[in-house]
Image (cartoon, helix red, strand yellow):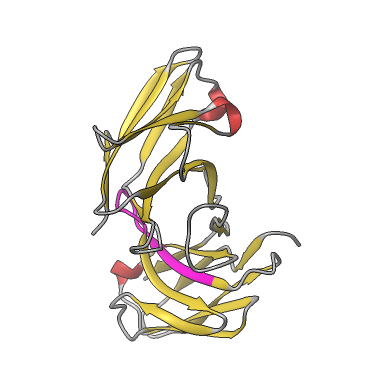
């Protein structure tokens, strides 16, 4: 069975500061891992995904995430926060050869202060 | 229209009303999904359709009734809902059922449902 834990329902940063959103997963088989962003009154938009190969994945809007198998983590980072990054972020996992539909975390609200 | 569209965007209904949510995808995808999004809870998968056939019903109460007349359209018929059913209902689609690799889900903007 697959599951996702996002630590921290809210993360607050200053504009220009490092963004770190944490995601830990459990999966019995090799996972596919995803980060989605949801802006107010919109649906989810894929930021980036890990399937196979390089463990450092780059996505849109300057975000990246690193798959660490030993830590079962897929944390999302951005070197310098922008006001427009304020949104809800969701981590998700699906299992290659297992449950093929992603399981989502509870989400983390990113608040960016000027 | 491009991507995944949902109508209406907002809906307020009484507990005895019957209403329907509509989702349309313009991506040529074969799989479509209904999700329920409640505040600070994980997205809850409700139903999955693949080539118009239902493949998942995630123990959803019968007051929610899905319909998929073709691969481009998905409906969610609502009847005698409860206040706890108030949530954002998201529709998504993907080319194939196995999400991963080159196959990703595309989400619509959702319908904000309020049950009085």
Q: Is residue B91 above or below residue A93?
A: below
The picture quadrant where one finds residue B106 is bottom right
Magenta segment boundaries in residue numbering = B32-43
Residue at 47%, 38% in the rendered image: A53
Q: Nearer the viewer, residue B89 or B17?
A: B89
Q: Residue furthest top?
A: A16
Q: Residue furthest front?
A: A53
Residue B30 position in % (x across, y down): 60, 73
Residue at 26%, 38% in the rendered image: A72
The picture quadrant where one finds residue A90 is top left
Residue B89 position in % (x across, y down): 46, 64
Q: Is residue B16 above or below residue A100?
A: below
Q: Pick the quarter of the image with the C terminus of chain B.
A: bottom left
Instruction: Verify whether residue B38 appears in magenta.
Output: yes
Q: Pick the quarter of the image with the N terminus of chain B.
A: bottom right
Residue A1 position in % (x across, y down): 23, 59
Q: Is residue A51 above or below residue B82?
A: above
Instruction: Verify whether residue B51 appears in magenta.
Output: no
């Amino acid at each position: 069975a697959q599951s996702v834990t996002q630590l921290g329902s809210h993360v607050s940063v200053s504009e220009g500061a490092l963004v770190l959103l944490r995601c830990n997963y459990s999966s019995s088989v090799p996972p596919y891992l995803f980060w989605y962003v949801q802006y107010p009154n919109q649906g989810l938009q894929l930021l980036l995904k890990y399937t196979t190969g390089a463990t450092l994945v780059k996505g849109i809007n300057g975000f990246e995430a690193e798959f660490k198998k030993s830590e079962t983590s897929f944390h999302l980072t951005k070197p310098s926060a922008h006001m427009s990054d304020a949104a809800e972020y969701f981590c998700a996992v699906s299992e290659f050869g297992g449950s093929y539909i992603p399981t989502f975390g509870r989400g983390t609200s990113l608040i960016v202060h000027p | 229209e491009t991507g995944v569209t949902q109508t209406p965007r907002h809906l307020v209904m009484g507990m005895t009303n019957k209403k329907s949510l509509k989702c349309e995808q313009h991506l040529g995808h074969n799989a479509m999904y209904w999700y329920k999004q409640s505040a600070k809870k994980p997205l809850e998968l409700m139903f999955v359709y693949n080539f118009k056939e239902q493949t998942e019903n995630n123990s959803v109460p019968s007051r929610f009734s899905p319909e998929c007349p073709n691969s481009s359209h998905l409906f969610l018929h609502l009847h005698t809902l409860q206040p706890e059913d108030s949530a954002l209902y998201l529709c998504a689609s993907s080319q194939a059922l196995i999400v991963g690799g080159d196959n990703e889900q595309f989400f619509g903007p959702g319908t904000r449902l309020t049950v009085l």
